[in-house]
Amino acid sequence: MATVYAKVNTKNTSKSKGKAPGSVTLHGLSPYVEKKNEEFMNQNQREHFKLILKAWRHELMEEVDRTVTHMKDEAANFPDPADRATQEEEFSLELRTRDRERKLIKKIDKTLIRVEEDDYGFCDQCGIDIGIRRLEARPTADLCVDCKTLDEIKEKQLTGH
C-alpha cells in the first residue's frame, strides 16, 4: 500500500518555503487548514481531497509501470532451478502487491465519483462527518471512526479472531 504521509524537506529550499519545518504532506500536498465555522466538505475541501486522491492514484499507476518494466528487464531463464524459483517467488510477491494496488485504484476511482457527486466525507452507516484528519489519513474512508470500530468488533466476533 502506498504511504500517505511523508516528511517535508526541512532545509530552506524553494520546495519548503511557506511550509513549517518538518510539516507533513499528503502525496506532496499540505494538509488542509480548516477555517473557523467552515462548512464541512465545502468546495475547497472537496477540491483538496480530489487532488490527494488523484495524486495517490498517479503514484500507484507509476508503481504499476515500474513493475512491468522491472519484470521485463529482470526476466531471465536461469539454468539453476533455485535461481529460477527465487525469481518466480519475487515476481509472485510483486504481482500480489500490484493486485492489491489495482483494487485500491478502483476504490480511489469510486471515491473520486463520490467527491464529484457531493457524497464524500460522510459516514455510510450513520451519516455524520467522517472528519478532515481521518480522510487525510485514509482518503477512501467511507465510515466514521465509531462505525469502523463497531464493524471491526463485529468481524472479530464472527470470525473468532
Image: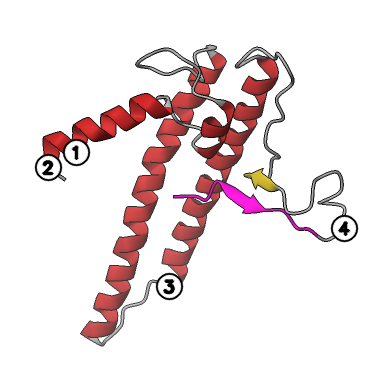
Q: Position of residue 96 (x, y in %)?
A: 32, 54
* Bounds of the magenta segment: 1-10
* Distance between the alpha carbons at the discs numbered 4 and 1: 48 Å
Q: Which residue is mark 1?
A: 156
Residue 160 in the image: above or below residue 85: above
Q: Residues within 10 Å of mark 2 (few under 14, many from 20)?
A: few
Q: Amino acid at mark 4?
A: Asn
Mark 1 and mark 2 in contact? Answer it, CB < 8 Å.
Answer: yes
Which numbered disc, 2 or 4, marks the residue that appears first in the sequence? 4
Q: Which disc, if any, is residue 160? A: 2
Dividing the picture into quarters, in which one does residue 82 lie? bottom left
Mark 2 and mark 4 in contact? Answer it, CB < 8 Å.
Answer: no
Q: Which disc, if any, is residue 12? A: 4
Which numbered disc, 4 or 1, marks the residue that appears first in the sequence? 4
Name which residue lies at 51% across and 20% down.
Answer: 121
Question: Which element type, helix, strand or loop, lies under badge 1?
Answer: helix
Let me know if residue 8 is in the magenta part: yes
Q: Amino acid at mark 3?
A: Glu
* Distance between the alpha carbons at the discs numbered 4 and 3: 40 Å
Q: Position of residue 112 (x, y in %)?
A: 52, 24
Dividing the picture into quarters, in which one does residue 80 lie? bottom left
Residue 81 in the image: above or below residue 13: below
Name which residue lies at 65% across and 12% down.
Answer: 39
Let me know if residue 32 is in the magenta part: no
Look at discs 3 and 1 and give the one toward the viewer: 1
Which numbered disc, 3 or 1, marks the residue that appears first in the sequence? 3
Q: In the picture provided, is 57 more to the left or to the right than 88? A: right
* Distance between the alpha carbons at the discs numbered 2 and 4: 52 Å
Q: Which residue is mark 3?
A: 74
